[in-house]
Image (cartoon, rainbow, N blue to C red):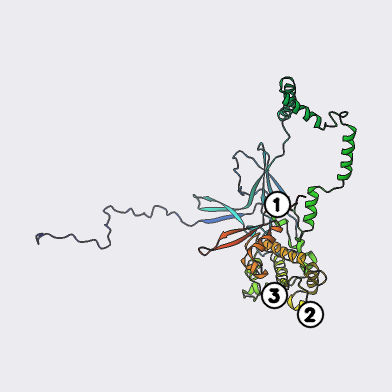
Amino acid sequence: MASGKEKKRKREQDGTTQPKKKVAIQTASEPAQSSTIRVASVKLDNSCPPVIATHPGLCLPSSVKFQAYTKPAPSNPKQKRGKHATPPTSSFLLHSSSHSKLDYTAKEEGPGGRESHLKHYVGVFDPATGKLSVVEARKMAVRGVVRSQQPREGDLQSSTASKNMLELRTDLGQAFGTKKSKKALAAIAENAIADDSRKPNTKAASSQAVMTAIGEITHTMASKEELQAAADAAKPIPPGNFEAREIQDVYTPQGLIGGELLNAIPIKDWQDAIKKGANKMLTSAFIASRLNPVGEGPDSTTRLKALRYLEFLIKFSKLIKGRTPKIPAPDKLRQLLQPAPEPIIQSIRRKFSSNQLIDKFHRDLLYTYCCALAAILSNFEFETSKLRYDLGLDDKQFAQYFREIGGKAKKATGAEKGTQVQIAVLSLPLEFPKVRYQRQR
């Protein structure tokens, strides 16, 4: 056993040892550096602003030089502006052709995009003075397009050389080939149809008569492209600008609904409810989920009217029951679509029914209209469960209707573990279902 005279060391109270060195204390003669950063100025440069550019999917070389182009922004006196909002007076564009094969173009995001309501700033901090200068920047996206090129002279010479080589092989086979190879070459020469520009006198009279008859019969036949265009025109899909380069220009509320009908849609009750923060009682799950984001976002008046028109279409879809649903009496139809004005009711009745019946064509047209409006109001990407519940469609039926307007429907992992949700995305280039042509037996 240890002797009783040995003393145990005492444990430190806080577990830390006091430093033996003295701590340097700042004297009064040394000035204290301020930790506060003051914003000296906020500049709004519309002529040559700084640019925050992204290039998704591109490996942009550092040697690329861009040329800047500006264009005065169109003035819209009817558009309501915020009290402190200063809209840009010009639109900005960057273009570069310095690459050997690609043309690069940087554009700003148009209205209705995901980040169109955000503003970006660049700050320059001076550590000596502690001041920060802030300049408003433009958020742009760089896209690359392959430049069209003419074929090289070497390619043309190689194609000519290959033709000469085929003729040489034919001559070589005639001179040194076996009887079987010579017989095969003779059969090829007999069955060949010579080109008119190279050998105009070698075609027999019977062959000319056959080709003339075939030309007279087939010159009035539609080509495959014309058949595809006719099939697309007969499809129950909403009208759109399918040659547009921006996705927000393909389907627009004005193009789907019409300018006069869009102005006649009432939204005053929704605007008052959004300002007061009150919960509006709605029968549609999708409309309820998009009311506040649309009402508080950019271009809220037009988008709220498009949302109210989508609510009218969802109510009208409740009539689709059985094989040939019928339009009810005018009083019941007004009660179903309230508070829709009379021009909106008559427009919906004429557009989505025929002879007071909702046949398959008009039913499909109604569902594709709902898909297009839902894509516009959700920034062209949304989860489909609420809209499918409102329309009474399963995931396969909804995916088919969304593909008809050029979009895609894909599966994604849900918020809860082990669940999957359906995501609908509308992006360029649009991919429509192709018409299948069955061969004759």
415 versus 325 height, above or below: above
Q: Earlier in the sequence, mark 3 or mark 2?
A: 3
Residue under circle 1? 91
Question: Residue 180: horizontal and vertical position, in percent?
Answer: 72, 26
Q: In this view, does 3 lie to the left or right of 181?
A: left
- Give whichever of 91, 229 is nearer the camera: 229
Numbered disc 3: secondary structure: helix
Which residue is at a point 70% across and 70% down the rendered structure image? 314
Front residue (pair 311, 211): 211
The percent position of residue 185, horizontal first and vertical second, equals: 76, 27
According to the image, label 2 marks what residue?
A: 331
Give the residue type at disc 1: Ser
Q: Is there any visible trace of residue 77 in the rendered image?
A: no
Q: Are marks 2 and 1 in contact (CB under 8 Å)?
A: no
Calculate the distance from the C-alpha at mark 1 to the C-alpha at mark 3. 35 Å
Looking at numbered disc 3 in the image, what kind of residue is underneath it? Asp
The picture places residue 397, in percent across and down from the top left corner, at 67, 63
Foreground of the two, 209 or 105: 209
Where is mark 3, residue-wise? 269
Crowding at label 3, few (<14), some or many (≥20) Cα neighbours within 10 Å? few
